[in-house]
Amino acid sequence: ETGVTQTPRHLVMGMTNKKSLKCEQHLGHNAMYWYKQSAKKPLELMFVYNFKEQTENNSVPSRFSPECPNSSHLFLHLHTLQPEDSALYLCASSPRTGDNQPQHFGDGTRLSIL
Amino acid sequence: AQSVTQPDIHITVSEGASLELRCNYSYGATPYLFWYVQSPGQGLQLLLKYFSGDTLVQGIKGFEAEFKRSQSSFNLRKPSVHWSDAAEYFCAVGEGRNTDKLIFGTGTRLQVFP
């Protein structure tokens, strides 16, 4: 499914670097989500945006900073990350929040922190 | 708190055999239940969902799932597995009517032998 596109697919960065993950959806949805997928752990919801407004921050450390300039684009800005932040970061979208509609996922960005 | 348990971490079946992946949830009201599949290097794809009505739900790729309230279960089944079904399968429950917060299980990895 190519409705939700994430770039880059892989990212290796040092703990002092600053980088950004990008997500773009072509489904006409208004809600977008960031998830973290670590080995042997369930997917963890990080942030939710609905019509560009953040509606959920699941106690995510401030070294992760989301940005949603419009309903089609979502960014995750990264700085001063820790080794335990190495994971697959998944973006998802849905028509809008609270509408019982399933979320559509991108293929993720595999992040490795050196 | 809501939770999802997938008791089987890893299942191996022969191609053509039947399949059942188990999912148990903990939720006070009528849950909103989902099954997603994740192939290597890809994001999550929705297989099927249950919101209300008929407790036997048909999904894509020949999968079905049955909601059993008395057992707090939502097991995924397929009568005849194909080699392309090898992937990781995730069960998820939505918190109430607001499916922003999906609680995921830890996943079941399916291997298919020819």
Image: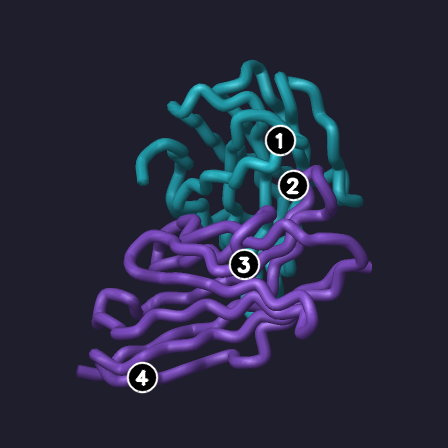
For discs 4 and 3, the disc positioned in front in the rendered view:
3
Q: What label sits on residue A99 in the rendered view?
A: 1
Q: With A40 as the anchor, is B83 left or right in this view? A: left
Closer to the camera in the image, B79 or B12: B79
Could you tell me how far apart the alpha carbons at marks 3 and 1 are, in whole angstroms?
Answer: 20 Å
The answer to whether A27 is drawn above or below residue A104 in the figure is: above
Residue that numbered label 2 is attached to = B99
- Give the structural element (helix, strand or loop) at label 2: loop
- CB contact under 8 Å: marks 4 and 1: no
- The reply to whether residue A66 is visible in this rendering is no
For discs 4 and 1, the disc positioned in front in the rendered view:
1
Could you tell me how far apart the alpha carbons at marks 2 and 4 are, in whole angstroms?
Answer: 33 Å
Q: Which amino acid type is shown beneath numbered disc 2?
A: Thr
Could you tell me how far apart the alpha carbons at marks 4 and 1 are, in whole angstroms?
Answer: 37 Å
- At a point 64% along the width and 23% down the height, the residue shown is A50
Could you tell me how far apart the alpha carbons at marks 3 and 2 are, in whole angstroms?
Answer: 19 Å
Q: Percent position (x, y) of residue B93?
A: 64, 54
- At a point 63% along the width and 18% down the height, the residue shown is A52
Residue that numbered label 3 is attached to = B55
Closer to the camera in the image, B74 or B36: B74
- Marks 3 and 2, the one that precedes in the sequence: 3
Chain B colour as displayed: purple
